[in-house]
Image (cartoon, rainbow, N blue to C red):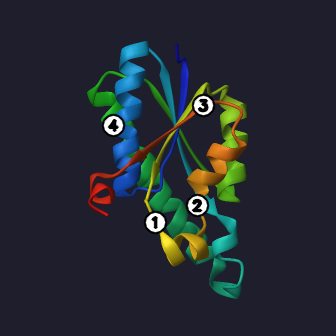
Amino acid sequence: MYRNILVPTDGSDASAAAVEHAVDLADRYDAHIYALYVVDSGSYGVLGESTPTVVEALREEGSQAVTSVEGTAADAGVEVDTAVVEGAVHRSILDHADEVGADLIVMGTHGRQGIDRYLLGSVTERIVRSSSVPVLTVRSSDDSER
């Protein structure tokens, strides 16, 4: 049913829950996982001269996040490729899904509500609305208490 599963991660608990689901699906369907971390180019545009330092720190954070996915997948015997890219988060996820031929995107949701959601937006919601392939959203266990 699924051959290529894209798992965008930001290293959060919500992403970790999504990784668990993705690895389970990949194991069940003998699928390949693509782990992606996007360094949000919009988040550091006003920093001026400190931008390279911030970008490097974000790339390191991304490397750690996809390495964590690798570990989880390896424990289940699932193959995984990783990538850390820069760009607009939702656009980069959709572009990467096309590049790797993903037939499923599995991603966490933080379950923000009210003003937080209005102010911060929802990358997951944008992916759900824009993706040409199915998107499985997974809430972290902390979100179920809201």
Give the Cα separation between the discs numbered 4 and 3: 17 Å
> Which label is found at residue 134?
3
Amino acid type shown at disc 4: Glu
Residue visible at 64% across and 47% down? 127
Front residue of this view, candidates 108 and 47: 108
Residue visible at 38% across and 53% down? 14
Give the residue at mark 2.
Answer: 122
- Tag nearer the camera, 4 or 2: 2
Give the residue at mark 4.
Answer: 20
Q: Is residue 146 left or right of residue 1?
A: left
Question: Mark 2: which secondary structure?
Answer: loop
Give the residue at mark 1.
Answer: 112
Amino acid type shown at disc 3: Pro
> Which is nearer the N-term, disc 4 or disc 1?
4
Q: Are marks 3 and 2 in contact (CB under 8 Å)?
A: no
- Tag nearer the camera, 4 or 1: 1
Q: Which corner quadrant of the image does residue 44 belong to? A: bottom right
Q: Are marks 2 and 1 in contact (CB under 8 Å)?
A: yes
Instruction: Say how many tags the image has.
Output: 4
Amino acid type shown at disc 1: Arg
> Which is nearer the N-term, disc 1 or disc 3?
1
Give the Cα separation between the discs numbered 3 and 2: 17 Å
